[in-house]
Amino acid sequence: MPVDVVREIELIEQLEQNHHLTKQEFQELLELRFATGNIDEQQEMDQILFAKARKIQNRIFGNQIYIRGLIEFTNYCKNNCYYCGIRRENGAVERYRLSREQILDCCKEGYQLGYRTFVLQGGEDPYFTDDRICDIVSTMKDNHPDCAITLSLGERERESYERFYQAGAERYLLRHETANESHYRWLHPPELSLEHRKACLRALKEIGYQVGAGFMVGSPGQTVEHLAEDLEFLWELQPHMIGIGPFISHKETPFANEKNGSVEQTLFLIGILRLMFPKCLIPATTALGTLAADGRERGILSGANVIMPNLSPVSVREQYSLYDNKICTGEESAQCTQCIQNRMKNIGKRIVVDRGDYPNNQ
Ligand code: 5AD
Ligand code: FES
């Protein structure tokens, strides 16, 4: 066996046992996998990691996959992140906001389809004041008391997060995007800071939310060292959910000509995350499904255990264009739930009607 593979197996076994490596070791592991141009070696390393990730996944979650109904309720955004297609300065995108009634209708429909978690995701849109969000959240909660409500609205004041929590939101997704200061500045305009993002994540945790963080794989300027820092940061944060997906360029952004991230690297990182965080809720993301037709299935087979199908009205889906060629935006995607059910069945998994909380007692 080649010496690189031997060393890699050693690191993976260490990770399996301790759920953790030093930053140096994380970096070494990623370098061994990402630097080798030998496809056989890559596949060998992947299979070793994914088998261990699946074993853990199976022990904690069996063959169950959780679904979250994603409602992309506004594509207005006051931010100007260089990678994102709904950034403020993209004048080419048609902006929309769902009305309170439209959002509630999405939930009603989702409930009938078996969803017990709704994710309200949107750009940072000042129209949706704290009062408006609280009203929507508490009405959702009144209508569907057995459902979990997840918010993903970006950075707000601690007091706002507290109000949303009191209104009935229990989970919050806020990807950190990159844990390295200078890389964060490379991806974001000066008015955004990693420090503030981290402060938001800590506040959310303190308030009592189940918190989700995460990053893009292969974003412009990203190095293996940055990825090791992402893993270190996640270890320190101990989130309940971790969303990662490949960076995909969007033609109306400053990163229009940048290279897309890699599906294989994303899958490898999902495997590592499953070993680090056995109980974590890790989605096989839409971005993964966009770069490979079987990306989400492969995400699940690498250790992910959540899928987030789109519940937004089909008429607006095209406009929530974070990146180019996003899947599930056409007419055919009115049936995402059925599609996902079939896809999961084909790989021996089962979608369950369940809130899919973070497992506390296993
Ligand atoms: N490619 C991949 N992911 C992206 N996101 C935003 N823009 C892109 C892109 N161009 C991700 C970010 C954000 C999440 C909602 O979508 O990580 O947190
Ligand atoms: Fe949306 Fe398949 S999941 S069309």
Image (cartoon, helix red, strand yellow):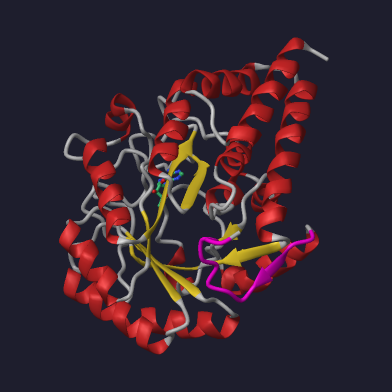
- Quarter of the image containing the C terminus? bottom right
Q: Is residue 187 left or right of residue 342?
A: left
Q: Is residue 259 left or right of residue 195?
A: right
Residue 348 shows up from this direction: yes
Q: Residue at x 62, y 17 (%)?
A: 35
Near-viewer residue (59 or 28) = 59
Position of residue 223 relative to residue 106, above or below, is above
- Tally the marks: 0
Magenta highlight range: 348-361
Q: Is residue 270 left or right of residue 247?
A: right
Whether residue 48 appears in magenta in the rendering, the answer is no
Q: Residue at x 67, y 17 (%)?
A: 36
- Percent position (x, y) of residue 281? 54, 55
- Percent position (x, y) of residue 169? 34, 70
Q: Is residue 281 left or right of residue 40?
A: left
Q: Residue at x 26, y 73 (%)?
A: 166
The image quarter containing residue 131 is: bottom left
Q: Extreme front residue here?
A: 361
Q: Residue at x 65, y 45 (%)?
A: 292
The image quarter containing residue 58 is: bottom right
The secondary structure that most of the magenta stretch takes on is loop
Position of residue 257 relative to residue 119, above or below, is above
Q: Extreme bottom residue here?
A: 143
- Percent position (x, y) of residue 271? 63, 40
The image quarter containing residue 252 is: top left
Position of residue 183 relative to residue 273, above or below, is above
Residue 99 shows up from this direction: no
